[in-house]
């Protein structure tokens, strides 16, 4: 029997599929990803559908951050790109 | 399998100019002058002098410097200086970020906090996306070149200090950073192409003299953690911080560049990071951090330290840029030609 392809379902984010994949969209468009692992958007908010662009993330306004600490941390996004 | 890209020689950069007694001592040691250990009691751990001195010590482990013998890398005089500088830097960071409690739950909470997005945030990428000017974008890229022209290299040092699933997953992410076998897709290469299309020099180390202490400190923290096996947990925390925060930040920079009418070749670097780091985030959390903690839960404390210290240094860098830019001042020590002239400086 062929080895089953693993698909990882993340907590609140994308599906992870390994190997190059071709995704067929409802309109018939085929999109290819050659990444070793591809993150498929399942929240339907991605602007790069069918791939995840982290748009699934929880968003807070500075004014309604639950705590000062949360507000502080959410401001910290100026590290270099990964 | 084999690339058509013509191999190019990377010329090591010239030594920078000293910024004070500590960097002068390191530069002297690199040139082979008799070692002189300066006083460190008064040294500003995040200041220009110490950060440049440390950066020069570390650069020996990367591309080195023009006309400096390669064996300076293991010169005991240089290493002795480096150890003193590292002690001051690490002690300050441990004092300036909240101490970790050592629990695995805290690591989870810390990483969860990194993936909460602001609706309207601060920070250079927010500013650049909203109303940043081209000279500010070019400054940003010039600062960042100190890391991105060797992107992935500081973190590669940790590979030999890991085992099993965490090692395999970290190498998969690094493989992607290095272009997944294609040198034309290497992130450092994409960054150089972006620099070229923004009219910046693509030469390795070209902006070292221009880079601020804040810029150098972020890269030095990566090198510090990469080069010390003792700090491998902190390196993983640092790696997680950039991989987890990169995707949305990169998206803002893509929009900034499109708004400013930059050529597509310039946009490619950050554009690639939007999707790539949406994947890297998951691989780092599920593939690197989780198995590492399962195998070595005692690393929790330093993983949190790595996240907090790199965030702390990123904040300092962000604050420098925003404070200066809102006053219309350049942030590079050697301003670019299109940057505004600081008022009164030419009189
Ligand atoms: S799952 Fe990530 S953007 Fe939809
Ligand atoms: Fe990445
Ligand atoms: Fe990258």
Image: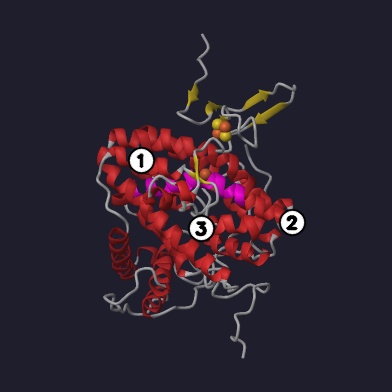
Q: Nearer the viewer, residue A70 or B86?
A: A70
Q: Residues within 10 Å of mark 2 (few under 14, many from 20)?
A: few
Q: Is residue B338 left or right of residue A63?
A: right
Q: Is residue A61 left or right of residue B231?
A: right
Outermost residue, bottom side: B347
Mark 1 and mark 3 in contact? Answer it, CB < 8 Å: no
Mark 2 and mark 3 in contact? Answer it, CB < 8 Å: no
* Residue labelled with disc 3: B147
Residue at the (33%, 46%) spot, across then down:
B303
Query: Which chain is home to disc 1?
Result: B
* Residue labelled with disc 1: B109
Q: Nearer the viewer, mark 1 or mark 2?
A: 1
Q: Residues within 10 Å of mark 1 (few under 14, many from 20)?
A: few
Spot occupied by residue B248 in the image (x, y as percentages of width and height): 56, 45
Q: Nearer the viewer, mark 1 or mark 3?
A: 1
Q: Is residue A12 left or right of residue B33?
A: right
Question: Image quadrant of residue B80?
Answer: bottom left
In this view of the protein, can residue B252 be seen by the observer?
Answer: yes
Task: Indicate yes or no whether the magenta region holds residue B82.
Answer: no
Query: Which chain is home to disc 2?
Result: B
Q: Earlier in the sequence, mark 1 or mark 3?
A: 1
Q: Nearer the viewer, mark 2 or mark 3?
A: 2
The disc placed on residue B261 is 2
Q: Is residue B228 left or right of residue A55?
A: left
Q: Nearer the viewer, residue A67 or B338?
A: A67
Q: Earlier in the sequence, mark 2 or mark 3?
A: 3
Task: Report the span colored magenta.
Answer: B232-252
**Do the residues indicated by labels 2 and 3 lie within the same chain of the protein?**
yes
């Amino acid at each position: 029997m062929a080895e089953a392809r693993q698909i990882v379902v993340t907590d609140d984010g994308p599906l992870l599929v390994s190997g190059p994949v071709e995704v067929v969209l409802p309109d018939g468009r085929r999109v290819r990803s050659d990444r070793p692992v591809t993150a498929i958007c399942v929240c339907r908010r991605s602007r790069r559908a069918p791939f995840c662009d982290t748009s699934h993330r929880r968003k807070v306004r500075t004014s309604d951050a639950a705590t000062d600490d949360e507000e502080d941390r959410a401001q910290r996004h100026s590290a270099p790109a990964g | 399998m084999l690339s058509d890209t013509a191999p190019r020689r990377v010329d090591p950069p010239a030594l920078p100019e000293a910024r004070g007694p500590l960097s002068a001592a390191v530069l002297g040691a690199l040139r082979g002058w008799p070692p002189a250990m300066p006083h460190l009691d008064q040294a500003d751990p995040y200041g220009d002098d110490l950060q440049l001195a440390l950066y020069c010590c570390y650069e020996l482990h990367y591309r080195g410097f023009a006309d400096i013998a390669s064996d300076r890398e293991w010169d005991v005089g240089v290493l002795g200086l480096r150890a003193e500088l590292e002690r001051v830097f690490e002690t300050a960071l441990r004092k300036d970020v909240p101490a970790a409690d050592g629990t695995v739950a805290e690591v989870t909470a810390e990483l969860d906090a990194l993936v909460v997005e602001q609706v309207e945030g601060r920070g250079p990428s927010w500013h650049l996306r909203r109303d940043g000017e081209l000279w500010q974008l070019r400054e940003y890229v010039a600062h960042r070149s100190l890391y991105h022209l060797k992107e992935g290299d500081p973190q590669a040092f940790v590979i030999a200090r890991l085992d099993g699933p965490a090692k395999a997953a970290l190498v998969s992410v690094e493989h992607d950073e290095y272009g997944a076998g294609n040198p034309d897709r290497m992130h450092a290469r994409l960054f150089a192409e972006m620099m070229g299309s923004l009219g910046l020099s693509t030469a390795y180390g070209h902006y070292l003299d221009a880079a601020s202490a804040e810029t150098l400190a972020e890269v030095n923290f990566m090198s510090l953690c990469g080069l010390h096996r003792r700090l491998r947990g902190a390196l993983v925390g640092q790696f997680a911080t950039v991989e987890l925060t990169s995707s949305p930040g990169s998206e803002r920079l893509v929009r900034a560049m499109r708004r400013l009418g930059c050529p597509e070749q310039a946009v490619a670097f950050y554009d690639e990071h939007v999707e790539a780091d949406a994947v890297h985030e998951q691989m780092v959390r599920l593939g690197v951090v989780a198995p590492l903690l399962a195998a070595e839960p005692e690393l929790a404390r330093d993983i949190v330290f790595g996240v907090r210290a790199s965030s702390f240094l990123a904040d300092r860098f962000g604050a420098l840029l925003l404070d200066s830019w809102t006053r219309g001042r350049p942030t590079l020590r050697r301003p670019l030609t299109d940057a505004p002239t600081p008022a009164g400086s030419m009189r």
